[in-house]
Structure formats: C-alpha cells, structure tokens
Amino acid sequence: MPPACPHGRSDREESSRLRSSIPADPEETIVSHSEVSAGIEEVPPSGVDASVPHSARVYDWWLGGKDNFAADRAMGAALVEAIPTLRAMAKENRRFVHRVARFLVAEAGIRQFVDIGTGIPTRPNLHEVAQAVAPETRVVYVDNDPIVLAHARALMISTPQGRSEYIHADLREPEKILADARLTETLDLDRPVALTLIAVLMLLRDSEDPAGRLRALMDAVPSGSYLAISHPTGDFNPAEMSAAVAAATRGGMTLVPRTRAEVERFFDGWELVEPGIAPVAAWRPEDGRPDDPHAAYYWAGLAGKP
C-alpha cells in the first residue's frame, strides 16, 4: 500500500503547522443549520415534492434539523427503527468528512474540492474546515434538492481569499456537473481536485452504473487529485441493514449497501491512502482507535490519482 500521502506537496514541518491550525476535537459539535433556524414551512416550495422522502432532508432530521417534511421524518424514523444507532452513525459520517478535509488540505496540499451529494448545510461545512487551514481553498458543492440550493446560496459563505459555489445537479449527470460554468469558473481542472462522495453512491442502483458515472468525474481531474468515499454496508450487521433496506424500499427511497470489495472497486486505478478501506470511525481517528470500529455501518476510503 502506498504511503499516507502519495501526492503530498508540503514538507513535514509545514504539514504539522497546518494541522495544528485546527484543533482536533473528537467531540466536535455537528449542527444542522436548520437546527438553529425556523426551518421550512410544511407547504413545500416550488419544485419540491414533499410526499416523497429525500435523503438530504432525512439526514437533516437525523441531525436534529427542521428542514424536512412529514415524509422525510417518517422515512427517517423507519430507518432508525431498523438501525437504532443511525443518528450517531450520521454524525460519525460527518466527522469523517472533517478528517478527510483536514488531511487533504494540511498534508496533501489540496486547495480545490467538488463535494457531490452535499445535503443541507451542517456546521462545520467542508469549506469551513478546509478554509480554516488554507483560506484560499475553493469548494464546489453539488446536490439535486432545491431546498439544499436555497440554504447553500444563503449560508455557504467563503473566506475572502477562497470561494464556495453551489450547483443544482445530480451524480447521474456527471457531464452536466463538469460543464457547469460555476464549476469551471471556480476551479482549475488542470490542478489537483478532491472529489468527495459521502453517503451518496448508496442512492444509485447497480443498474444506474454508479461506477461509470463516478469514473467520468475521476477521468476529468488530473494526477495528484483525490477521491473520498463513505458508503453504508451490511458487512457489520446484516440483519439491521437488511431491515433498513426494506424500510427504505417501502418508503420509496433507494438504499443500496455494498460490501468492502464493492466499495474498493470504486477506487480502481487510484492509490489508496493508509489505512485503505476502513470502517468510517476507524479511518484516521483523531482521538485514538474507537472502542468499536464497526459501530457505524459505513466503509470509508481515500485514494490519490497517480
């Protein structure tokens, strides 16, 4: 397996200095923006079908937010009934985002991100974590929920030195993402980019070719780029995950858990960073190895493009 940072561009002392600019806090607060706002009215805005649950709004409900409708809350509750620790898993997944961002900026020298499947803003957001280390970092967020769009435009405020932008698009349309002027005007695709897909590939069935759609994005970025993925799995507790899949199916939401080998295949051709494909709580934990690394039913990994 390659060293921890196969494409690092900073020397060890500089990496240490950058890492120290954000104190690692294993108990950092994960706060949905809507937890401290009025939330949305039960009458949905134009373009939103409130009768169908959406993963971004279900996730918002798990994190204590208010930007969700009855269908989202019902779906969230059904999934929690199947997996009682799901709320804690959602927070663990967000902590993985923060650790990845810190690593990529401080140790790999990354200054550009594309975050696909952003969800409703949750403090700290990816750009806030990255820009706290390197204020010039630029982040493009992508999601297909109009409610996410409304919040992102109001709240995804960048540092003066950097930039954050939002695209209303779907992973199923990688060409649309890559051609969007908000991406091409914000990022330089001739320089390394980090692609982050956190708990989003689970929303695509195998028949929708998630690997092929992801590969279109991977092929568009240069050597030295990175790919971060977290993905739910039935490997740790097959019974609970099967119950969750059944609940999602009944509620009209796609949920496709995948095995470790299936998740690893998404990275084919790229060099996995230590520790490779790991339980999400055990991927470079900042407070030592977790008591039970399998408590959160997600695989996670990061790889660099040779």
Image (tube, grey):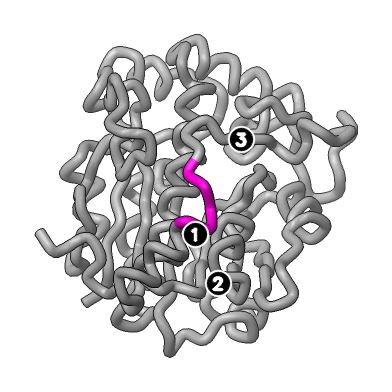
Q: Magenta residues?
A: 20-24
Q: Nearer the viewer, mark 1 or mark 3?
A: 3
Amino acid of disc 2: Ile
Sequence-wise, the earlier of marks 1 and 2 is 1
Q: Is residue 164 above or below residue 273?
A: below
**Residue found at the far bottom of this picture:** 190
> Residue 214 shows which numbered tag?
none
Inspect the magenta stretch and tell me whether residue 21 lies in it.
yes
Based on the displayed image, in which of its 4 quarters is residue 237 positioned?
A: top left
- Mark 1 and mark 3 in contact? Answer it, CB < 8 Å: no
Residue 297: horizontal and vertical position, in percent?
34, 27
In the image, 146 versus 107, the foreground residue is 107
Mark 3 = which residue?
30
SS for tag 3?
loop
Q: In this image, 274 relative to 43: left or right?
A: left
Residue under the point 28% across and 27% down: 293
Residue under the point 46% across and 16% down: 85
Number of other residues with Cα within 10 Å of mark 2, as a class: few under 14, some 14 to 19, many 20 or more? many
Tell me how far mark 2 sits from mark 3, CA to CA. 28 Å
In the image, 6 versus 263, the foreground residue is 6
Residue 46: horizontal and vertical position, in percent?
85, 49
Q: Is residue 91 above or below residue 167?
A: above
Amino acid of disc 3: Ile
Using the rendered image of the protein, determine whether residue 257 is visible from the camera's viewpoint. no
Sequence-wise, the earlier of marks 2 and 3 is 3
Based on the displayed image, in which of its 4 quarters is residue 31 positioned?
A: top right
Residue under the point 20% across and 48% down: 275
Q: Is residue 239 above or below residue 165?
A: above
SS for tag 2?
helix
- Mark 2 and mark 3 in contact? Answer it, CB < 8 Å: no
> Residue 177 shows which numbered tag?
2
> Residue 171 shows which numbered tag?
1
